[in-house]
Image: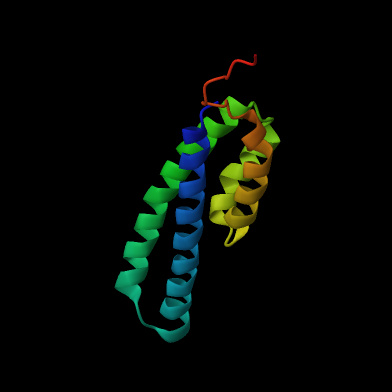
Amino acid sequence: MKSSVLTRYRVMAYVTAVMLLILCACMVAKYGFDTGEGLTLVVSQVHGVLYIIYLIFAFDLGSKAKWPFGKLLWVLVSGTIPTAAFFVERKVVREVEPLIADGSPATAKA
């Protein structure tokens, strides 16, 4: 597996998690303080598009890492639970890093 697969997943995991936290703050402002309705709409749509991209990259990583269905499902759903993607991303990186093919050329030993 190439390191770019993991990098794409990591970037989208962080972006999706941050956008979800921003969306939660907007929802609190909208329903708690009756302000920011337009902002909430925009943030929710942006998060939706970014979450779809996250799903694609997470599915790609999961298929290349040969995860069982339950694990893949948990990684996919973690983008919808506030702060879960941060913790899941760290665990995924620890598990997937040993699977990454080393791109450096082999040195010959004398």
**Residue closer to the observer: 82 or 5:** 5
Q: How many marks?
A: 0
Q: How is the image coloured?
A: rainbow
Q: Residue at x 32, y 71 (%)?
A: 39
Query: Whole-percent x and y of residue 93?
Result: 62, 43
Q: Is residue 43 left or right of residue 68?
A: left
**Residue closer to the observer: 68 or 109:** 109
Q: Residue at x 52, y 21 (%)?
A: 105
Q: Residue at x 46, y 40 (%)?
A: 8
The correct choice, above or below, for 96 with respect to 33 in the image is: above
The correct choice, above or below, for 53 with respect to 103 in the image is: below
Q: Is residue 20 left or right of residue 44?
A: right
Query: Whole-percent x and y of residue 37?
Result: 34, 74
Query: Whole-percent x and y of residue 10?
Result: 51, 46
Q: Residue at x 44, y 66 (%)?
A: 23
The correct choice, above or below, for 45 with respect to 11 in the image is: below
Query: Whole-percent x and y of residue 67?
Result: 66, 30
- Please identify the residue farthest to the front as the structure is shown: 110
Instruction: Judge whether residue 55 can be spotted in this image.
Output: no
Corner quadrant of residue 81: bottom right
- Please identify the residue farthest to the bottom as the structure is shown: 33
Which quadrant is the C terminus positioned in? top right
Which quadrant is the N terminus positioned in? top right
Instruction: Judge whether residue 28 can be spotted in this image.
Output: yes
